[in-house]
Amino acid sequence: MTTSSRDGVCRPLVWAHTLASLAYIVIVLFAGMLYSLQFLSLFPFPNVEFLSPGRLRMLHTNGAVYGFIINGFAAGLYWAIPRFTGQRVWNEKYVGWFMFGALQAAVLATAVGLLAGYAQGIEWAETPIFVDPFIVVWLIVALFQFGIPIYRYGKSGPMYVAAWYMVAGCVWVPMVYVMGNYIPQFFVPGIAGAAITGTWIHDAVGLFVTPIGWGLMYYFVPILLRKPVWGHSMSLLGFWGLAFFYPLQGVHHFLWSPIPMYAQYAAVISTVVLELAVVTVIVNFVLTLRGQFGQLANDLPLRWIYTGILNYAITCFQCAIQVLLTSQKIIHFTDWVVGHAHLIMFGTFGFWIFGILSYLSPKVKGLEPRSTRAGEWAYWLITIGTILMWFDLLIAGVVQGVSWMSLAPWMESVRVSVPFWAIRTATGTMIIAGMIMYLVHIAESRRAPSAGRAGSA
Amino acid sequence: MSSSSMERFAPIVLVAGLLFFLFGTFWQAVAPWLSLRHLPYKSIDEIAQTVPPTFRMMADDYPDEFKKYFGEPDTAAFARALRIGRGVYVAEACWHCHTQQVRPVSNEELRFGPVSYPSEYANALQLPPLLGTRRVGPDLIREAGVHSSDWHMAHFKNPPAVTPGSVMPSYGWFFDKDGSPGERALAVTAYIQWLGSWIPNHAYELPTRPAAQPEKQ
Amino acid sequence: MADDPSGTGRRVYEENCIGCHGTRGDGNGDAAGNLLTKPRDFTRGMFKFKSSRGAMMPTDQDLINTLNNGIPLTAMPPFRLMTEPEKRAVIEYVKSFSDRWKDPQAYDTAPFVAGRIPAYVGTPVSIGKGEEIFKRCISCHGKTGKGDGTSAGDQMDTWGYHVRPRNFTYGMLKRGSRVEDIFTSITLGVGGTGMPAHETAYSENDRWNLVSYVLTIMGKVKYEVAAEDDDE
């Protein structure tokens, strides 16, 4: 099962991670859909312990990160790293397939553990405590699996910025995972522990998902556009801006809490300033696209990716506003934050994975990616669904925040939210419909195009 | 600046990057810990030394069930109830819809009670901390005694029946087959009734006065 | 039916009260079966915690107090955040469940108001006097105030539910959380239960002394240990 071609890519591994990623996102979407029905008092399985809405919520978030995103990124990394470094990963036959199996086992153990009631009380780290050591081992093995080819490649000259991001992500994530999962669980209680969990929540996004995601973008965007990224210096500027400001932001998840204000102020300021680094990255990618905007019309993977970049820009700009202590008075604890999280985790990183996977799925079979009718449906249903959901939850958040501030009875804030929650469920239905279309698209694009009606990219 | 000249600084930048990371983690995670390290830490057994009246009342209200699962309402039983109750609170993701912090803004003090302060979190029941980041239902850190235990039982069984319009799920599996409160129902109620029990929320207290007429020296 | 042209009272009732007190106000809502202290049956027009004497109707302020503070130790939660017009409207709606409200004879012309707390409440002397008087209460409330006196076991209230004499060691009382509320309960009794009025039986001083002793059982009288004389 190690059929590496001359480019050093182990195609079965890429395809296996692709399938796993797609399987998990379907489960994750249905878990989120079921959870959202509880908010409309339409939950179909009341009083079933193992399908409790609370437990499904944790399946929704953890399945998204550990099942969907890690598998999707792994597929991208197994493709990208050998192709731009010219080096094969550490070992496909044993390490690669072991990592694949171990990851799926860990995600399934997490899913079963969460539904059976063994959650850990830390946000984005609800993985049961007995699964955590295996994930740490997996992350360290992953560091070697993907770090070794990059190290060999780096010895031969200056490193391409994609490699910086990937290495940084692989180095950071085991450290922050250990910090976030163990220190507040066993050693540091209370408010100091909360500061650490905040740092973990944000590092999980900022020092793992973001750098790996951007690393993949710095590989796939030039490939899809067949030209280099606009500015290399600008790329490095964005990278170091991220490296400097991201770890300083953790406490912005607990603003106005009893955490010392110096940590809160630092988190607010660094979050606002990070916007500068984000702007350099966004400008870099938009300028790369300059002159080729038309390609978005026919090139589905590219369109997914650039929609993700647009959503990233929106989310980060939104972040710089919502993190202000004044905004926090209204929107903290509300659906605003839920909308924000959906736009970054799904609308950005999810879209990138959709783009990468729709590019890779035919590629690993030796076919060229092409647009299909189902693919178009998938793109529009998911994009419109996600944007509507984000906007709906944003307004819901403001309404809830103002309702709480007004000292109306608590149930008032629930009653006014129900219409927004109904819209959320409707947009979720759109996303699930789009997801089914996406699966159809993947299947179609892996069939040899019948002559004459192939819309090649 | 050409890209190659940028690359020449790579080792320096790499070290700087690591320092940035350490600095950020220090400022956000380590420094708050150093600042709050002096707060006296309480284990669950130390917390349980003060058995709140709600726990004793629960033993009177549900005598058979309480005896079956917890025995007498003493400190050992209370410690056990807190442990199990917080476990349920985490496993059922209560903390994803209920926060445990009152902020000094947005009239929260008027809605929930006194603003949260660091020392009330320095205990084993906030390990990991359960401050929470989303409020679908109200905050719970000042919940002790606001509702009675039988209210909580009826509410866990069917929240919308007690609070019309509530979107909280039912927790039928907290109860025994005959519908009487099971171990988890009693434990999680004991845990919720503990939240904020350290803050006097009743005004009965008379002004503090000297015990005896002190001799003026 | 009460005058409620805007329907506010009905709306507030349906949004907040219906789960326990029921559609018809008979205290048989969906949740009532799971509650130990049964919700008030409004159709009887009888109430426990009020400032009027005997079986007379509570004042609006009594009902507002109940809405604001709830009834501690029972499932009646506080509804502090309801607006004043909503509170008034829902009270009018509750009145529509019983015709007793229409009987002018059922009102107390001079509802009881507890005066200021005398300075001696909570002093050792007052507590000592209260302890003497409390001996007449132990058949129900028990020697240690745990509500486990010899005749505590078999008491029913007017609504036909089993009731227990108050266990003071819980540190909370149903009527309210002010010291004056204890005094009011001693003076007027608790409507519809075995707790009688003592307005004529005991002098005002005796009743306040009793309050001192009850506060002691509740663990609410705080004394400073006589301070060591510092060099200040």
Image (tube, rainbow, N blue to C red):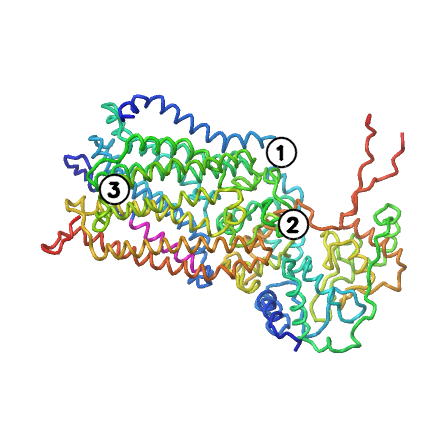
Q: Amino acid at mark 2?
A: Glu
Disc 1 marks which amino acid?
Answer: Pro
- x and y percentages locating residue B202 in the rendered image: 71, 51
Residue occupied by mark 2: B72
User: Which of disc 1 and disc 2 is earlier in sequence?
Assistant: 1
Q: Nearer the viewer, mark 1 or mark 3?
A: 3
Dot 2 crowding, Cα within 10 Å, few <14, some 14–19, many 20+: some
Foreground residue, A341 or A290? Answer: A290
Per the rendered image, the range of residues in magenta is A22-37
Identify the subunit bearing mark 2: B
Q: Disc 1 on helix, strand or loop? A: loop
* Residue linked to disc 3: A290
- A323 lies left or right of B206: left
Q: Is residue A146 visible?
A: no
What kind of element bears circle 3?
A: loop
Work out whether residue A335 can be spotted: yes
Query: Depth check: C136 or C31 in front?
Result: C31
Q: Position of residue A186 (x, y in %)?
A: 50, 36
The N terminus of chain A, quarter of image? top left
* Residue contact at pointers 1 and 3, CB within 8 angstroms: no
In this rendering, do the residues under marks 2 and 1 share a single chain? yes
Q: Which residue is under mark 1?
A: B40
Assign a secondary structure to mark 2.
Answer: loop
**Percent position of residue B185, x then y:** 56, 55
Same-chain check, marks 1 and 3: no
Report x, y in % for residue C19: 58, 66
